Amino acid sequence: MTTRWVLHVDLDQFIAAVEVLRRPELRGVPVVVGGDGDPAKRGVVATASYEAREYGVQSGLPLRTAARRCPEAVFLPVDREAYEAVSAEVMAVLRELCPETEVMGWDEAFLAVRTDDPESFARQIQDRVLAATGLACSVGIGENRLQAKLATGFGKPAGVYRLTFRNWFEVLGDQPASALWGIGTKTAAKLAGLGIHTVRQLATADVAPVAARFGPTTGPWLVLTARGIGSDEVSADPYVPRSRSREVTFQQDLTDWGEVRAQVRRIAGQVTADVVAERRPAVRIVVKVRYRPFFTSTHGVPLPEPSSDQAVIEQGAAAALEKFTDRRPVRLLGVRAEFAAAG
């Protein structure tokens, strides 16, 4: 009987790679994609090519900072439609190879594969994606989604890596807890407060104090994650976005809170159009505020009932905005409408 594996396919430097395909002369050149492509204006990096990353340019970095770190970089505007079209081609290839493909976004997917040679299947994926689109991808192999996802990072760029229970602690045991999928810097800092710094320490920790610190659900989940235990379910259902959002970066800081309210209302109206197009009502509205110089905060509110009505969504955004007490100058505003969980 063949073994069932979970594979994680991740397109390497996806957005930058798509731009290089359209502009072959940029191959080998530092490329930064973000905003309207003008580093003199406010905006953030959507993605950077590997050449740009060598200069410390990463996603989320202000474009102006990216330009200072890598002045020879080529800056390009975000072209969402182009990325969606190429992503659709890639996912079609994956589904041809494996019906059990779960799309996770533009540039990644999980596959459930029955084979005695997962590395060979992974290389077949890479060859087919490259032939169809010209894009390179990395493939992680695991016994569950957690292992496959983390394995991909060890395979980049354009490589294949297997991470299982057999080599889990050999590979990750001495790594910081933040190396685990789902554990960010804040959670890692709280774990450090319990004397837990590495994956191995978390895996062997007494669950009781971890649960006392993080709660009866999250605490045990953290320990299980450190042991490499996770779901192996892969759904072939069509990809369904969890939310729709819009953001605006202002070239001049907003200092009048009345203007901030007006802009949030305007952005909420744009998000409403996205919600209506999605044909699913929103259940929660989140507002994002980035203050000068670059401090970001979010607040959200649940809607009284699921709704696609613009007035309701605008009211939700207004209520979320009122949770902000800081009145410092604002450089970015965003509104996100979240949908009910599928199923």
Image (cartoon, rainbow, N blue to C red):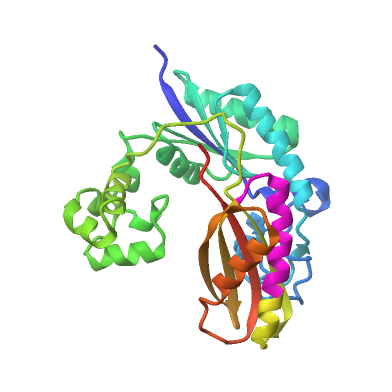
Viewer-proximal residue among 174 and 105:
105
Place of residue 37 in the rendered image (x, y in percent of width and height, measured from the top left): 78, 66
Say left or right for 338 vs 199. right
Viewer-proximal residue among 133 and 26:
133
Q: Main secondary structure of the magenta part?
A: helix
| Vertical arrangement, residue 293 with respect to residue 306, above or below | below
Q: Name the residue: 50% across, 32% down.
A: 7
Place of residue 74 in the rendered image (x, y in percent of width and height, measured from the top left): 77, 63
| Vertical arrangement, residue 15 with respect to residue 326, above or below | above
Image quarter where the N terminus lies is top left
Queried whether the magenta region covers residue 275, the answer comes back as yes
**Magenta range:** 263-281
Place of residue 206 in the rendered image (x, y in percent of width and height, measured from the top left): 16, 52
Displayed quadrant of residue 35: bottom right
Place of residue 228 in the rendered image (x, y in percent of width and height, measured from the top left): 33, 41
Say left or right for 294 vs 309. left
Displayed quadrant of residue 136: top right
Queried whether the magenta region covers residue 119, the answer comes back as no
Viewer-proximal residue among 168 and 143:
143
